[in-house]
Image: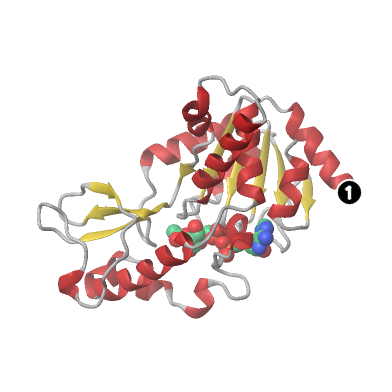
Amino acid sequence: MPDVIAEARRLLATAPRVLIFTGAGVSAESGIPTFRGPGGLWKTFRAEDLATPQAFARDPRLVWEWYGWRRGIVAGCRPNAAHVAIARWMMLRDGVTLVTQNVDDLHERGAVEAARALVAEGLVVAGGERAALERAAPVRLHGALFVSRCSHCGAERNDREPVDASSRETLPRCSCGGLMRPGVVWFGESLPEDAMRRAFAAAGEAEACLVVGTAGAVHPAAAVVHATAEHGGAVMVVDPGPTAYDEIAEAKIVGKAGEVLPEALL
Ligand code: OAD
């Protein structure tokens, strides 16, 4: 095992409280495009046409077409070894908070796989499978692709339906008659308050922060990692490319999440 992974493993095992902070790269090996790398979504699409409140007001059909396409991609993908390793680790030890910028549901589905494996191995998870899934649930900073929210009354619903974006008339509607919108955070919008409070609370007390697959380019989410570093927590980065955190990282593991995490999280 490379020394840097052994060092990260040691830091993670000895820290009473750990923050795991993930971005698009943790889902890359599942087949979901990242945003800024080669083949990244923002290389092909303009965020201002698709991921802003103004874009939705101007052309909700176009915005829903894009999010419907992304829902289809995610629905056809499976969690990878990184999602499963993170969830398993969280189920087997205390003091871990997972904060994600991702809107896919692969952390949750990885947790289902991890819980089933623990049950099959006869490893008792206190409180059973449901409690195990709760332990591994992520704090979501950027919302969720499979949630829709009414643009009129604000009601939210889980929504895994394919979207018929063939015309404005076929777009999803709320029972109040308002147009539903994707339950994600767009550029120019505030992040959900409760998620921010929980993320910064965890960052403020964590002795170690494991950053996985994020360029660290989007604020305020990116500041969560700095909050750990500012109070002396050790930052570790798993990413095949450069990130905004490389200079503050005590350990930079250059590699793919699905290959590194099953070794680092033991
Ligand atoms: P980026 O596309 O900016 O960064 C993805 C990171 O993942 C890069 O550093 C890649 O090197 C790395 N990466 C690629 N493959 C990997 C692998 N197999 N294992 C580990 N890392 C890998 O995506 P984010 O940082 O997540 O916001 O982007 C942050 C936010 O910008 C997103 O949440 C989204 C976007 O605009 C909103 O939609 C509000």
Instruction: Give percent across and percent down for residue 98.
Output: 56, 39
Residue 36 placement: quadrant:
bottom right
Residue under the image location 85 percent in, 40 percent down: 6
Residue occupying the point 26% across, 60% down: 181
Residue 25, percent across and down?
61, 59
Which quadrant: the C terminus?
top right
Q: Amino acid at mark 1?
A: Pro
Q: Residue at x 15, y 50 (%)?
A: 153
Looking at the image, residue 254 lies above or below residue 234: below
Query: In this orientation, which residue lies closer to the viewer: 133 or 228?
Result: 133
Q: Residue furthest left?
A: 176
Residue 217 shows in the view:
no
List x then y, in percent, for residue 42. 50, 73
The residue located at (75%, 53%) in the rendering is: 259
Category of crowding for the residue at label 1, using alpha-carbon neighbours closer than 10 angstroms: few (below 14), some (14–19), many (at least 20): few
In the rendered image of this protein, does residue 211 appear above or below residue 243? above
Q: Quadrant of ligand 1?
A: bottom right
The yes-or-no answer for disc 1 within 8 Å of ligand 1 is no
Q: Nearer the viewer, residue 51 or 260?
A: 260
Q: Quadrant of residue 235?
A: top right
In the rendered image, is residue 23 in sight? yes
Task: Out of 222 and 156, give the one closest to the viewer.
Answer: 156
Task: Tell me the element at label 1.
Answer: loop
- Left or right, 253 with respect to 111, comes to right
| Image location of residue 133, percent across then percent down | 50, 34
What's the coloring here?
Answer: secondary structure
Q: Residue furthest top?
A: 126
Pointer 1 residue: 2
